[in-house]
Image (cartoon, helix red, strand yellow):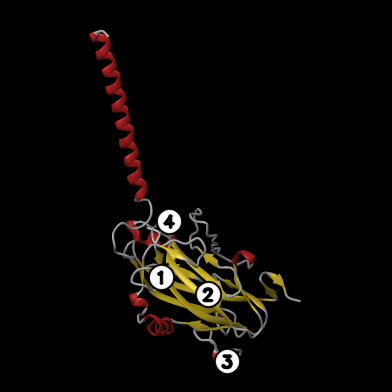
């Protein structure tokens, strides 16, 4: 092999190696960018400031933190912060002020994991928020979330709303929040405020900004006459959501859930 041929072959190899190194470097940069697209990278999380659950349909539908059987007079129309705090003290030795939301993810609204795949338990040091309550109705009905609300006298009150007093970009937390309703005998239904593109296998629904149209898509569970149903309510930050990044850390949340009962349907089907 001539000296010139040897030099030319080594130059070609050097150029190919440089191209490979450049490609690997670009790939690494893209990998870093993707890793910070969702999930927090440091440990300062979001908290729940206020949580209220209210019934918007007079005496037909009621709720309680305890099971009172068919004695409907022992049920009420509102679950307040104080009631939830009593539940948390009794069952978890903490209050809403102690609830810290850590990004988690789920494919079924029942089982939750952290980014590394390890299991997350509710109301832990940093995890997701969960409580149980009991709904009861005077008639067979399906129960829906609503953007509209009325009190027992028919006076209009605020409907379902998830809000924050945190400024931008912390306020982007409103796009990463999920709420699941897990009623015995019914499939889990998940409300996603400001719903965006689907990011997990979990199906979600959003509510309209104006007049409600009650249908199967926003029905969350069904009730049989004077038969209480235990319902788990779960609130979490979806770690797979693009908005669940460092920008939303230390944000606060206020949650108001408004429920209505639509008489004459169970599981979305007419009752004979």
| Earlier residue among tags 2 and 3 | 3
Q: How many marks?
A: 4
Labelled pair 4, 3 in contact (Cβ < 8 Å): no
User: Badge 3 is on which residue?
Assistant: 73
Comparing labels 1 and 2, the label whose residue is closer to the camera? 1
Does 27 appear above or below 213?
A: above
Does 212 appear above or below 42?
A: below
Please tell me whether mark 1 sits on a helix, a strand or a loop: loop
Is residue 6 shown left or right of residue 83?
A: left
Instruction: Find residue 98 and report its horizontal and vertical position in percent.
Output: 33, 76
Q: CA distance from mark 1 to mark 4?
A: 18 Å
Comparing labels 1 and 4, the label whose residue is closer to the camera? 1
Q: Residues within 10 Å of mark 2 (few under 14, many from 20)?
A: many
Q: Residues within 10 Å of mark 4 (few under 14, many from 20)?
A: many
Residue at 56 percent of width and 68 percent of height: 188
Instruction: Find residue 124 and report its horizontal and vertical position in percent.
Output: 36, 72
User: Badge 1 is on which residue?
Assistant: 121
User: Badge 2 is on which residue?
Assistant: 258
Comparing labels 3 and 1, the label whose residue is closer to the camera? 1
Please tell me whether mark 2 sits on a helix, a strand or a loop: strand
User: Badge 4 is on which residue?
Assistant: 240
Is residue 85 shown left or right of residue 73?
A: left
Residue at 28 percent of width and 27 percent of height: 18
Residue furthest left as drawn: 3
| Earlier residue among tags 4 and 2 | 4
| Earlier residue among tags 1 and 2 | 1
User: In which quadrant is the N terminus drawn?
Assistant: top left
Instruction: Find residue 107 and report its horizontal and vertical position in percent.
Output: 50, 60
């Amino acid at each position: 092999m001539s000296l010139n041929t040897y030099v030319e072959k080594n130059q070609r190899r050097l150029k190919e190696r440089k191209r490979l190194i450049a490609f690997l470097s670009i790939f690494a940069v893209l990998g870093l960018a993707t890793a910070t697209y969702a999930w927090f990278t440091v440990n300062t999380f979001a908290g729940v400031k206020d949580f209220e659950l209210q019934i918007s349909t007079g005496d037909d539908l009621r709720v309680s933190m305890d099971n009172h059987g068919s004695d409907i007079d022992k049920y009420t129309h509102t679950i307040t912060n104080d009631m939830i705090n009593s539940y948390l003290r009794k069952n978890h030795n903490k209050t809403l002020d102690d609830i810290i939301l850590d990004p988690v993810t789920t494919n079924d609204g029942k089982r939750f994991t952290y980014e590394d795949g390890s299991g997350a338990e509710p109301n832990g040091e940093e995890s997701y928020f969960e409580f149980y309550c009991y709904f009861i109705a005077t008639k067979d009905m399906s129960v829906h979330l609503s953007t509209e609300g009325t009190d027992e006298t028919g006076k209009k009150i605020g409907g379902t709303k998830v809000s924050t007093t945190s400024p931008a970009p912390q306020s982007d937390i409103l796009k990463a929040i999920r709420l699941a309703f897990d009623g015995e005998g019914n499939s889990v239904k998940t409300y996603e405020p400001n719903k965006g593109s689907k990011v997990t296998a979990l199906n979600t629904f959003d509510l309209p900004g104006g007049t409600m149209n009650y249908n199967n898509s926003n029905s969350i569970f069904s009730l049989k006459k004077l038969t209480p149903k235990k319902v788990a309510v779960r609130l979490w930050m979806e770690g797979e959501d693009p908005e669940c990044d460092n920008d939303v850390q230390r944000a606060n949340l206020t949650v108001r859930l408004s429920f209505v009962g639509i008489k004459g349907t169970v599981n979305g089907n007419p009752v004979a």
